Image (spheres, rainbow, N blue to C red):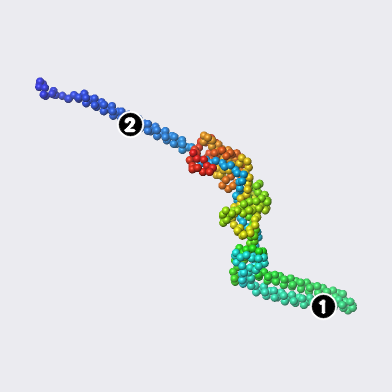
Amino acid sequence: MSDDPTFPESGPALPDAQHIRSLKRFGIGAALIALAVAATGIAMRSSAERQLTVSSAEAAVPIVAVIRPTTGKSDDTLVLPGSVEAWNSAAIYARSNGYIRRWLADIGDRVAAGQPLAILDAPELDQQLAQAEADYQTTLAQQALARTTAARWEQLLSQDAVSRQEADEKAGDYKARQAVANASLANVRRLRALKDFTRLRAPFAGIVTSRSAQIGALVVSGTAASQPLFTVADEHRVRVHVRVPQSGLSAVSPGMHARMTLPEHPGREFDLVVARSSAAIDPNSGTMLVELQTDNPDGALRPGAYAQVHFPMEAPPGSVHIPSSALIFGTDGTTVATIDANNRVRIRPVKVGRDFGKQLEIASGLAATDRVIDTPPDAIRTGDHVQVAKTATKAGRDGD
């Protein structure tokens, strides 16, 4: 071994102390970073699990729309559809066979009672009438001869020139000829009546609402397939027929007034008077037919028109209105689902009053301060927790 300090001794070189300390610091820092990353991942996973649990719990709670019942007003009205009908309406058929020669009235024309509407040509009927009149003249001649003979034989009987039997036979023959003449006269009158039917006339004053008569068309009377040649309607006064549901019958009585509106007359109301009812409820619809009447001086009301009739209805005290979609029909009867301040469901039985179409009157079981679930789920039960849907502010609807 050399004593020269320039050359180190042979063997591995020992690490520097400062370098060792740097490595230790690096290792400790890496370990701390790893621990921080691990802790952050665990915390994020835990937070995600908590959020998933909360989201699942919230998803399990149904979201419902809530409405507020509206208080019934003292001037409530029951609005029902009605049909306008003419005071009188008649379909004019032909009573004689023939061809249409002329038609004298068309749709929309106003006609007087007895005014001709069409004229038919009936040549066969003309020939039958001529033959019947000739037969009647023959029977009249035979009747006259029989009368003269019976008178002559009665005179001979008074002179004992003939027997009573012969005189009675002549008198009987006269009576038989008289009966034959009467039968011939009846046949002539029948054919003349049929001849008069070749002129179709209006049965009353009114307006022609339909016409199917065409010049030259063959008209055959007495067949099931025949159609009316004209229809005449008397619209100086109209009838309005309304089917009133059973729940509203107590408020409808003869003599009461109602209002009517029509789409073709916006802003105009017509005063109606209840005239009569069928006094029986239709088991298929649960309604009763009610007839109302009103004058129609200006012809604004057209037969066959659709109308809305407003019956005045006094609201029972304590009654409220809710949409029909809020009702629940089940084995427990008619119920509604309400929610309390904690959004807990309570199923409550109610008594339904009148039906206003989109709205129903609840006579008892519900107050105006209650919160009612609109269109409740089928599986909803008392005690269930629900969420109130956030909706825009609307009449009768709540939103958080």
- The residue that disc 2 covers is 37
Q: Quadrant of the N terminus?
A: top left
Q: Where residue 106 appears, x then y in whole percent?
A: 60, 66
The kind of residue tagged 2 is Val
User: Furthest residue to the right?
Assistant: 159
As drawn, 10 above or below 378: above
Counting residues from the start of the chain, the first of labels 1 and 2 encountered is: 2
| Up/down of 186 relative to 262, above or below | below
Instruction: Please give left or right for residue 164 compared with residue 97 in the image.
Output: right
396, 143: nearer the viewer: 396
Categorize mark 2 by other alpha carbons within 10 Å: few (<14), some (14-19), many (20+).
few
Residue at image x 67%, y 67%? 114
Callout in the foreground (1, 2): 2
Write down the quadrant of residue 150 in the picture.
Answer: bottom right
Tell me if I can see residue 278 in this picture.
no
Q: Which disc number belongs to residue 353? A: none
Q: Percent from the top left, x then y, of residue 331?
A: 59, 40
Q: CA distance from mark 1 to mark 2?
A: 147 Å
Picture coordinates of residue 22 (x, y %)?
24, 26
Q: Secondary structure at mark 1?
A: helix
Looking at the image, which residue is at 46% across and 35% down? 57
Residue 325 is situated, as x and y percent measured from the top left of the image, at: 55, 44
Q: Quadrant of residue 327?
A: top right
Q: Which amino acid, mark 1?
A: Thr
| Secondary structure state at the residue bearing disc 2 | helix
- The circle drawn on residue 148 is 1
Q: Is residue 164 visible?
A: yes
Q: Residue at x 74, y 75 (%)?
A: 136
